[in-house]
Image: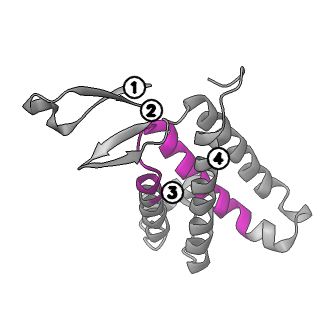
Amino acid sequence: MEQVKHPSTARGGSTQRHDRETFVGKAHLPVAPPRSRFRYGLASLVVTLAGLASRRYAPRLPDFVAAYAGDTLWALLVFLLAGFVWTWAPSRRLAVGAAVFALGIELSQMNHSPWLERLQSSRFGALVLGADFFWIDLICYAVGIVAGLLLDRWLRHRPASLHSR
């Protein structure tokens, strides 16, 4: 249980105790628990390994999975890393931030300046920045971010075990 101060506290009101609630105006709204950096770091590592595996083993995967898994997992990773950094940020804000970041990266692929092409020619640059603009990537990003929202909900509302931090 945490102490939450009602907005009227500044005018002499009392401090009240509430379990996972906060005041917004006069309404009580539930507040999600903060994100566990351990869980989000572990999930980010798993997603990174899955994304790299989707590239390495693409010939062995179904064509649809080989074509779209990498971009989808990349967007999921962006969402998870944002959750790792901003543990108290609302999930919607993380989703919007991840979508804006992904859109910016995708739009940057239409720019063919020499310095950007040099950066994209490295393995790391190709994995992070991609190389060519494709509209279908935006759909993959949306799917990855929605998956991030679902995973966020699951990770934040799971009961803590002895091994979680």
Where in the figure is residue 2, as x and y percent of width and height?
A: 39, 25
In this rendering, the answer to whether 4 lies above or below 108 is above
Which mark is drawn over residue 118? 3
The magenta span reads: 68-95
Q: Disc 2 or 3, which lies upstream in sequence?
A: 2
10 Å crowding of disc 3: few (<14), some (14-19), many (20+): few
The kind of secondary structure element at disc 2 is loop
CB within 8 Å, label 1 to label 2: yes
Where in the figure is residue 164, as x and y percent of width and height?
A: 67, 25
Q: Please say whether residue 33 is visible from this viewpoint.
A: yes
How far is the residue under mark 4 from the one under mark 1? 23 Å
* Residue linked to disc 1: 2
| Callout in the foreground (4, 2) | 2
Callout 3 amino acid: Arg
Which mark is drawn over residue 66? none
Callout 4 amino acid: Trp
**Residue 14 in magenta stretch:** no
Picture quarter with the N terminus: top left
The kind of secondary structure element at disc 4 is helix
How far is the residue under mark 4 from the one under mark 3? 40 Å
CB within 8 Å, label 4 to label 2: no
Where in the figure is residue 66, as x and y percent of width and height?
A: 79, 66
| Callout in the foreground (2, 3) | 2
Residue at image location 67% in from the left, 34% down from the top = 42
* Residue linked to disc 2: 19
The kind of secondary structure element at disc 1 is strand
